[in-house]
Amino acid sequence: MFFVVGDRDRLIEQYPRNQVWAEIGVYRGDFSQKVVDICKPAEYYLIDNWTFEIKDHNPFPDEAENFGGFSSKIHWQHFGDDPVATQEHNYQHVTSRFAKNAEVKIVRANSIDGIKSLPDRHFDIMYVDANHQYEYVLRDMMEARTKLKPGGIMQMNDFYEGPGGADQNLGVMGAVNTFVKRYDFHYIAMSFGAYSDVILAEDPTSPLVMQFLENLNNSNLTFFGMSEALVPNIRYKAYRKKDGSERYLPMF
């Protein structure tokens, strides 16, 4: 497994062009635009329901410790006073944004129904960035694996434990680690920094994986190899600088 000193944008720069992509969890399509511009996908399915349900973010009927502040964070920081209207606006924004991109296909559905609607063994790369609670993530991954071509890659957003993760109920790292054990997938690479991405593949010797690694080797990125056994234990710690800002350092 390679730990890459760069963000998710630098990771996707290493993919070969003209692959078949799906992105689950789109929001306003900012990352989708980067995939279109950088990766030039042959086909690109964008899946999101563009609706808002607070129960999808806080599983408890009351404001339990560690989760009480999360509802308000999601509500105010991302969706404003009228979250339903905001999400409808986001959908219209994405539709308009990619209207001239013939390769982009927009699927308005929740993550699991949207993934199930896709053709089996059709995708080279599946990017999963939907509901980040453990059970949702694991279910999305279990279904997404049936849509990958042999030798395909799954990339997961917010593979992270550290400051902010507890308040946001992030379950991505736990779900990914469970998935890897259940289905004998392998960690290929991950990005650096808080809310990093991780890349997985069932066949670490597939042509797609090998091309990704060759491109990484020929890039100007700094990266280093680490044992897969260490990956589940990665966490980030925040250090405050003299100027008041924070930096996040990975702890192995």
Image (cartoon, rainbow, N blue to C red):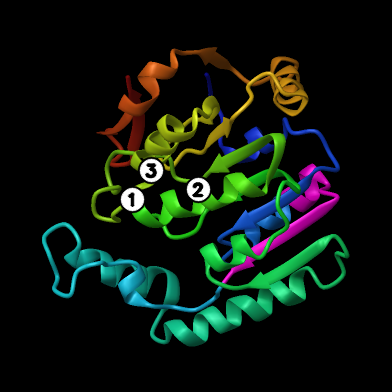
Q: What amino acid type should be assigned to the residue bearing mark 1?
A: Leu
Instruction: Please name the amino acid that badge 2 sits on.
Output: Met
Pointer 3 residue: 175
Choose the circle earlier in sequence order: 2 or 1: 2
| Mark nearer the viewer, 1 or 3 | 3
Mark 2 vs mark 1, CA separation in Å: 18 Å
Point 57% across, 83% down: residue: 88
Query: Compared to 190, does 79 lie above or below?
Result: below
- Comparing marks 2 and 3, which lies closer to the viewer? 2
What's the CA distance linking mark 2 and mark 3? 10 Å
* Residue depicted at x 77% and y 66%: 105
Q: Nearer the viewer, residue 225 or 147?
A: 147
Tell me the amino acid under the disc marked 3: Ala
Q: Is residue 81 above or below residue 55?
A: below
Q: Name which residue lies at 70% across and 52% down.
A: 120
**Quadrant assignment for the C terminus:** top left
Q: Which residue is mark 1?
A: 170
Along the horizontal axis of the image, is 143 left or right of 108? left
Nearest-to-viewer mark from 2 and 1: 2
- Which mark sits nearer the N-terminus, 1 or 3? 1
Where residue 216 appears, x then y in whole percent? Answer: 69, 21
- Horizontally, residue 18 falls left or right of residue 9, namely right
The magenta segment is 35-48
Given residues 100 and 173, the one toward you in this image is 173
Evaluate if marks 1 and 3 touch, with contact meaning CB atoms under 8 Å apart: no
Crowding near pointer 2: few (<14 within 10 Å), some, many (20+)? Answer: some
- The residue tagged 2 is 142
At mark 3, the secondary structure is: helix
Of the pair 6 and 205, the residue shown nearer to us? 205
